[in-house]
């Protein structure tokens, strides 16, 4: 064999090696190739990748059957923001997320503009539908975990999880269950104290309302049996009963006034129409789904002492007691989906309206206590947004998750500055935007 053939052979070998190496080259994170590879590895179906006018990519598809959407900017900083959506009526259908935003789909940006703001700052922004509506913490955790893993395969080097209302509970669950997955967490008006705390609030309000309205024109169908679905109990029926109660009180009816004062005092709720209707209505549209999903009430008030009425002895003797069966599994379900442990490593910023008729502000100090008990207070900052009336009149009452885009995006900016630059936000700060 002559020298020329040897050189040709070496050259051919090197060329083949280079070609093989090129075939195994890792695609640029966020590129179409990286998305397709991640989709193949994650079992994504119905994948669609569309070039945006700004040079970024709109990505849609299904993960484990759940529709998802992501926006990946042209100049991606490598970080991603996931938004866990909140409670949807059990009778509704899960809305398919859209990367184009709320103009074409209400779940395109269910975040008060947070996802759109994050995308404009160079973050990939993504959200997902769940396998069911109604009480769907288990399904929300699974869907968002799958979305996280997909984006990690696309090339995400760090991810944030955010969520509103029930999505706030999902946010806490993800941060605690998967401590290595998220660098920051932002629950807002979230069920941060846990789903057991939410059911405690709703059932307690109902049984106290039933006690004080029993035998009055304001009593609801099923009075005395708060844990059983009653077909005669509808949202319009609730609205009518409560409005009549407040109308009578406003007209000087002392008995109606006493009912309102005592319910508000015992339940720790503002004495307004909205703050009464909201928790009662939720036990109408959500009770059947909740009982079926959890397998029971998950909450018992047996042995609980209610305080704050004109006669606590009479109240505690006469209020309905909800007991758990000996073989109950619903309590364990609430723990799993989800009662917080306070153990998370992500930086977490939680903010809440100081008065919320569905997810009470009291959940924030309760959650603070849970976190403090395990020595993790350094990773938690809590901030407030002042209560805002639903129709700008003090008499109407506050609304659930009533934020401006400026407040939400401002909290997001505080969180990312804490995570990425070490600047911890001010704990307890009032971030209300008054403009």
Image (tube, rainbow, N blue to C red):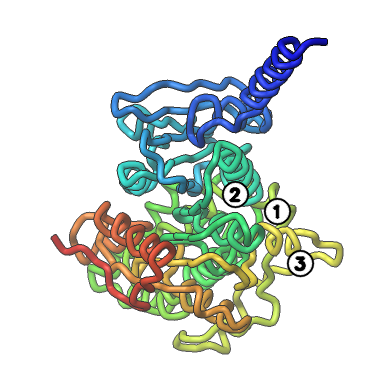
Please tell me how crowded label 3 is: few (under 14), some (14-19), or many (20+) other residues with Cα within 10 Å: some
Q: Nearer the viewer, residue 394 or 79?
A: 79
Q: CA distance from mark 2 to mark 1?
A: 9 Å
Q: Nearer the viewer, residue 157 or 193?
A: 157
Q: CA distance from mark 3 to mark 1?
A: 12 Å
Please tell me how crowded label 1 is: few (under 14), some (14-19), or many (20+) other residues with Cα within 10 Å: some
Which residue is rendered at x = 40% and y = 58% of the image?
A: 277
- Give the SS element for disc 3: loop
**Pointer 2 and pointer 1: residues touching (CB < 8 Å)?**
yes
Q: Nearer the viewer, residue 247 or 410?
A: 410
Q: Is residue 160 shown above or below 10?
A: below
- Give the SS element for disc 2: loop
* Residue 265 % position (x, y): 42, 80
Q: Is residue 15 left or right of residue 35?
A: right
Q: Is residue 165 shown above or below 302?
A: above
The quarter of the picture where residue 417 lies is: bottom left
> In the rendering, which numbered label is found on residue 294?
1
Q: Is residue 74 left or right of residue 197?
A: left
Label located before the other in sequence (3 or 2) = 2
> What residue does disc 3 label?
324
* Residue 425 % position (x, y): 35, 72
- Give the SS element for disc 1: helix
Query: In the image as oriented, which residue stretches furthest toward the front?
Result: 2
> What residue does disc 2 label?
135
Comparing marks 3 and 2, which lies closer to the viewer? Answer: 2
Q: Is residue 127 left or right of residue 114?
A: right
* Residue 313 % position (x, y): 57, 89
Label located before the other in sequence (2 or 1) = 2
Query: In the image as oriented, which residue stretches furthest toward the right?
Result: 327
Q: CA distance from mark 3 to mark 2?
A: 20 Å
């Amino acid at each position: 064999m002559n020298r020329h053939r040897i050189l040709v052979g070496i050259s051919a070998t090197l060329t083949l090696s280079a070609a093989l190496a090129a075939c195994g080259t890792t695609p640029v994170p966020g590129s179409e190739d990286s998305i397709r590879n991640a989709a193949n590895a994650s079992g994504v179906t119905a994948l669609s990748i569309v070039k945006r006018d700004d040079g970024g990519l709109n990505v849609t598809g299904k993960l484990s059957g759940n529709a998802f959407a992501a926006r990946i900017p042209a100049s991606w900083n490598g970080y991603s923001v996931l938004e866990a959506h909140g409670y949807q009526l059990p009778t509704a259908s899960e809305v398919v997320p859209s990367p184009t935003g709320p103009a074409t789909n209400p779940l395109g940006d269910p975040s008060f503009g947070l996802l759109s703001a994050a995308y404009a700052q160079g973050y990939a922004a993504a959200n997902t539908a769940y396998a069911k509506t109604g009480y769907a913490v288990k399904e929300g955790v699974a869907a968002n975990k799958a979305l996280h893993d997909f984006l990690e395969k696309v090339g995400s080097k760090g991810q944030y999880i955010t969520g509103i209302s029930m999505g706030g509970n999902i946010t806490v669950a993800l941060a605690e269950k998967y401590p290595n997955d998220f660098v920051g967490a932002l629950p807002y008006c979230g069920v941060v104290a846990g789903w057991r705390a939410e059911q405690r609030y709703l059932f307690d309000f109902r049984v106290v309302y039933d006690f004080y309205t029993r035998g009055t024109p304001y009593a609801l169908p099923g009075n005395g049996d708060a844990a059983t679905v009653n077909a005669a109990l509808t949202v319009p029926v609730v609205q009518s009963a409560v409005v009549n109660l407040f109308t009578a009180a406003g007209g000087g009816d002392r008995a109606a006034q006493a009912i309102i004062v005592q319910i508000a005092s015992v339940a720790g709720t503002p004495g307004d129409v909205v703050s009464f209707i909201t928790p009662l209505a939720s036990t109408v549209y959500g009770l059947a789904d909740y009982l079926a999903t959890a397998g029971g009430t998950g909450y018992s008030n047996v042995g609980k002492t209610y305080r704050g009425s004109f006669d606590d002895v009479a109240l505690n003797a006469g209020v309905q007691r909800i007991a758990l069966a000996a073989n109950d599994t619903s309590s364990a379900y609430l723990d799993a989906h989800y009662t917080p442990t306070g153990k998370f490593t992500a930086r977490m910023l939680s903010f809440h309206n100081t008065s919320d008729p569905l997810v009470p502000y009291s959940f924030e100090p309760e959650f603070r206590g849970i976190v403090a008990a395990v020595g993790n207070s350094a990773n938690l900052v809590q901030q407030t947004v002042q209560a805002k009336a639903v129709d700008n009149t003090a008499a109407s009452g506050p609304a659930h998750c009533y934020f401006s885009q400026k407040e939400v995006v401002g909290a997001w900016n505080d969180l990312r500055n804490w995570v990425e630059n070490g600047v911890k936000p001010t704990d307890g700060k009032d971030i209300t935007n008054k403009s």
